[in-house]
Amino acid sequence: MRRAGSQDRYQPAGGSTLAVNRHGCPQRVKVLLDANALMMPAQFRIDLFSEIRELLGSFEPVVLPGVMQELAGLSRAKGNDGAAARLGLALAEQCTIAEDNGSSLPVDEQVIAWAAENCGLVVTNDRRVRDALLAQGIGVISMRKQKKLEILRR
């Protein structure tokens, strides 16, 4: 086993080149963040981006405009949920905002449609969304034991 922070002697130094994704493109993996994923850092004390980086290496975080609207609505509430949504909005500003396709679908359905269209991973704790994504063969990153993130594939 290798300790965190120590270099792996079997890997080339530098790390500037990216591994190819499953379609052979050397681009970063796109990871779509759901509203409840953006609220995880406040609710469960998880460093979301470093946990994903630990799982995948280099990645591109993506947020849908509908998720931003959902977080904006939740951020008006008082208490822990409102504070978590405000932190989620701040984290979402560090991500790439996906194109708004003008869809009138609910946000959860937009997340599923985006993931199917763009072949990306989705970070969510919503069981219904997670099961729908896994049924379509799309990878999901979800929380395990309220401490760590894990990749689920079917």
Image (cartoon, rainbow, N blue to C red):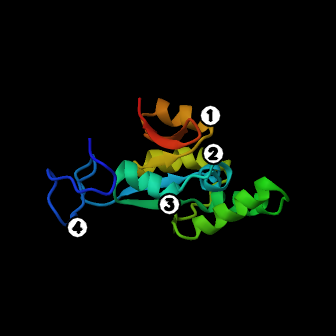
- Location of mark 4 (residue): 16
- Location of mark 3 (residue): 62
Residue 56, image x, y percentages: 36, 51
Label 4 close to label 2 by CB (< 8 Å): no
Please tell me which of labels 4 and 3 falls first in the chain: 4
**Which amino acid type is marked by label 4?**
Ser
Pick the front one: 86 or 109? 86
* Left/right of residue 80 with respect to residue 130 in the rendered view: right
- Location of mark 2 (residue): 108
Crowd class of label 3 (few under 14; some 14 to 19; many from 20; radius 10 Å): many
> How far apart are the alpha carbons under marks 4 and 3?
22 Å
> How far apart are the alpha carbons under marks 4 and 2?
35 Å
Pick the front one: 127 or 105? 127
**Which amino acid type is marked by label 3?**
Val
* Left/right of residue 42 with respect to residue 151 in the rendered view: right
Q: Residue at x 23, y 53 (%)?
A: 20
Crowd class of label 1 (few under 14; some 14 to 19; many from 20; radius 10 Å): few
Crowd class of label 2 (few under 14; some 14 to 19; many from 20; radius 10 Å): some
Please tell me which of labels 4 and 1 falls first in the chain: 4
Label 2 close to label 3 by CB (< 8 Å): no
**Which amino acid type is marked by label 2?**
Asp
Q: Give the label on residue 128, or none.
A: 1
Q: Residue at x 57, y 44 (%)?
A: 124
> How far apart are the alpha carbons under marks 1 and 2?
9 Å
Viewer-nearest of labels 4 and 1?
Answer: 4
Crowd class of label 4 (few under 14; some 14 to 19; many from 20; radius 10 Å): few
* Left/right of residue 107 with respect to residue 20 in the rendered view: right
